[in-house]
Amino acid sequence: MTTFSFTVQSVCLGGLALLFGYTLWLMRTGRLNAQITVRWVLAESAVFLAVLLWRWLPLFSVTSTLGDRELLVILAVVFFVFIAFLVLDCLVRISTHTHQIKLLTQELALLRECTEPRRDQKIVEPSDRE
Amino acid sequence: MKLLIIIPAYNEEESLPGLLEEVRQAGYDAVIVDDASSDSTKQVAKSAGFPVLSLPVNLGIGGGVQTGFVYAERNDYDIVVQVDGDGQHDPGQIPKIISHITRGEADCVIGSRYMPEAPDTVHETSFARRMGMYFSTGILHLATGLRIHDTTSGFRALNRAAFGFFATEYPVDHPEAESLLLLHQAGFRILEVPVMMRDRTGGQSLFTFFRAILYPLRVIIGFMGILYKKTRRNNI
């Protein structure tokens, strides 16, 4: 590995550590649901390990024979794949929740239709007695 | 046979009273699906004495109509007719639409404005809607071989099997063309009958210029999703 690649590795690890810390802080302040964040934390940990161990990983070990610019290109591609995966993962979650909200909304409307006439009746009943 | 008219309505306080009066005079059962309107649509529908399914958040036309299908299924109706809340669909033409279903000739019948033998020359369709309709007609023909002339018509009748199917699976946004593909894939029989439509008596169409631009993309993605599902089912 060249000194340049070591610098890139350090910057990546530093950035990921900051991101991890920020994620934990968001969870602690209750803005991120722990259950939903599990996949994100797993993905973050996988990237952290990949950067930490890239000297021994087949994809990154190739970079040791390449120049500095190629290393950056490979990092950029990996970063893009990582972001694309996260976006898709978010879309899947949003789709699932949208479907659940739709079902709940429909059930609520059907339930209202059954209960509202009874409620109106109850409101009317006392005045009728008078 | 028990028949239910499903009327999806979003901000239709002006059109709804006239339409509901026509439905009452014809003696049909009806349910109004209020898609979280910001005007007095719900009150207007309730004061007419029909059951109202009041959605707490806006689901779009697909989600609204599907709620009506679930209602029809749970209340043991045999046929449903979808009639738009804007007053464009004449309840007087319902017998014509349901006749093929009662005779068992079709599972879904579409009231069509563009059938070559009897085109609707009175009602004027906007340019954006016409373009969207031609696009979805073409893509449906490519995907299935079906020749439907009015894929965007919301004036439809369905038998119990077809609306029961839609109660579990129905597209959310611009569902008309996609729902035809779904029916075809599931093996239901689709027919068209010529009808005359009227101009809306109030409110505004949801098919705006901006939506018209996005419509082809939505249709393509929706069709791809349905066709992919079908392929996967076949493989299983």
Image: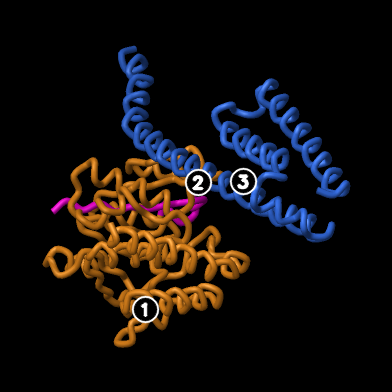
What is the quadrant of the C terminus of chain A in the image? top left
Mark 3 and 1 residues: CB-CB less than 8 Å, in contact? no
Residue under label 3: A86
Chain for disc number 3: A
Hey, what amino acid is under mark 2?
Answer: Ser
Outermost residue, top direction? A130
Residue under label 1: B141
User: In the image, A69: left or right of B151?
Assistant: right
Front-lying residue, A81 or B203 = A81
Among the 4 quarters of the image, the one containing residue B182: bottom left
Q: Secondary structure at mark 2?
A: helix
Percent position of residue A128, x then y: 32, 18
Characterize the local packing of mark 2: few (<14), some (14-19) or many (20 or more) Cα atoms within 10 angstroms.
few
Say if labels 1 and 2 share a chain.
no
User: In the image, A46: left or right of A129?
Assistant: right
In the image, which residues are magenta?
B1-17
Q: Residue at x 64, y 51 (%)?
A: A58
Among the 4 quarters of the image, the one containing residue B234: bottom left
Q: Residue at x 49, y 64 (%)?
A: B221
Colour representing chain A: blue
Colour representing chain B: orange
Hey, what amino acid is under mark 3?
Answer: Leu
Q: CA distance from mark 3 to mark 2?
A: 14 Å
